[in-house]
Image: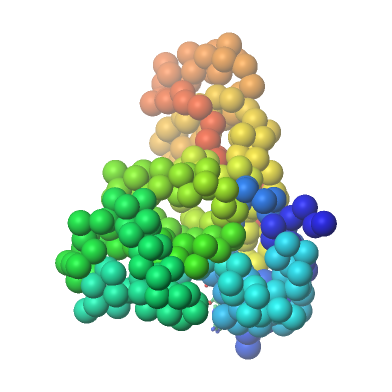
């Protein structure tokens, strides 16, 4: 028995003139929420598209519960729920119709489709919108709808490509809680994002991906602690510099020193500091 729900092994994707993925490997445990965190163009969507069977890798393997996704494409598809980066609902159709079509595509019986629609609309707080056209929904509602559409056929693995991009902070937090609830019901989730606070809030483990390469994988807390606990931003006239400390006394000592002359702010270290630190090291 393979303990990994998802195992990505040495993936390469070469487009003419661009190597989108270079030797990408990571494993996701059953029930885990794993985040692929990286800037624009890092290769997040390419990874998701390969796992979902939408594009082939140049080289490498994807195992789902130990079985090759490429050798068992139909089975793999049934195990995966995909929420693509751009919301691709049919806006002229109703909420119910969008879910219905997905059920048909996944060869669910009519009875099963109807029951599942009721159940998921209730779960997403969208029951009252069942007959509404998608174009009448707010951005947050549309996002919840694409997520439950991906859950229609009861996949074990949910792939979320930038699930909160373009949403305001309040709605974004609502979607975060919604994703947490889905995970707590026993699903394994792979999420991509370039929002540091999203990965910090949601992920059990995070992989940083830059220019098609995974450069580090760990728990958000471990990444943060590797830098320190306290961050002191000092606003020098030419540039802002951040200093990291393990102990509060050391941070306060420096705060006192610099605050006589410059604007300073003392705060907790976060995942964005870790990200920026990696970016600086690469330059
Ligand atoms: N069909 C394609 N043909 C050629 N190049 C591509 C294609 N799809 C992606 N790329 C390139 O591969 C690289 C990775 O793209 P990808 O969409 O995976 O990044 P991403 O991390 O999802 O970025 P974003 O945060 O902007 O969504 C980029 O350099 C992109 O231009
Ligand atoms: Mg993308």
Res 205 seen here:
yes
**In this view of the protein, which residue sits in the foreground, 121 or 16?**
121
Q: Is residue 242 above or below residue 17?
A: above
Q: Quadrant of the N terminus?
A: bottom right
User: Would you say residue 199 is visible in this rendering?
Assistant: no
Residue found at x 48% / y 44%: 180
Q: x%, y% of residue 147?
A: 41, 61
In which image quadrant can residue 226 be found? top right
Q: Residue furthest bottom?
A: 16
Quarter where residue 261 is shown: top left
Q: Residue at x 44, y 41 (%)?
A: 238
Residue 149, image x, y percentages: 40, 66
Q: Say left or right for 100 vs 42.
A: left
| Residue drawn at x 37%, y 57% as measured from the top left | 120
Taking the view exactly as shown, the residue that stands out farthest to the front is 111
Give coordinates of residue 107: x percent, y percent: 49, 79
Left or right of 8? Residue 134 is: left
The quadrant of the image that shows the C terminus is: bottom right
> Which sits in the foreground, 25 or 188?
188
Residue 139, image quadrant: bottom left
């Amino acid at each position: 028995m393979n303990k990994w729900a998802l195992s990505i092994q040495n993936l390469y994707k070469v487009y003419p003139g661009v190597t989108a993925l270079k030797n990408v490997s990571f494993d996701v445990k059953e029930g885990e929420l794993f985040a692929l965190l990286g800037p624009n163009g890092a290769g997040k969507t390419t990874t998701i598209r390969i796992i979902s069977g939408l594009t082939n890798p140049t080289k490498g393997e994807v195992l789902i519960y130990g079985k090759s996704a490429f050798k068992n494409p139909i089975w793999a598809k049934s195990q995966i729920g995909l929420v693509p980066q751009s919301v691709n609902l049919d806006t002229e159709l109703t909420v119910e119709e969008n879910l219905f079509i997905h059920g048909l595509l996944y060869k669910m019986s009519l009875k099963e489709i109807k029951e599942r629609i009721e159940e998921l609309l209730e779960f997403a707080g969208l029951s009252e919108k069942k007959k509404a056209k998608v174009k009448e929904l707010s951005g947050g509602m549309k996002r919840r709808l694409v997520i439950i559409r991906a859950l229609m056929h009861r996949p074990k693995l949910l792939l979320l490509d930038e699930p909160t991009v373009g949403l305001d902070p309040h709605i974004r937090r609502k979607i975060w809680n919604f994703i947490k609830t889905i995970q707590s019901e026993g699903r394994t989730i792979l999420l991509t994002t370039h929002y540091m606070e999203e990965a910090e809030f949601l992920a059990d483990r995070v992989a940083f991906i830059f220019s098609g390469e995974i450069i580090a994988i760990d728990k958000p807390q471990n990444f943060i602690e590797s830098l320190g606990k306290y961050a002191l931003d000092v606003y020098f006239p030419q540039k802002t510099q951040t200093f990291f400390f393990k102990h509060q006394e050391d941070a306060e000592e420096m705060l006192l020193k610099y605050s006589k002359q410059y604007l300073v702010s003392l705060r907790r270290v976060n995942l964005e500091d870790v990200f920026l630190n990696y970016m600086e090291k690469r330059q």
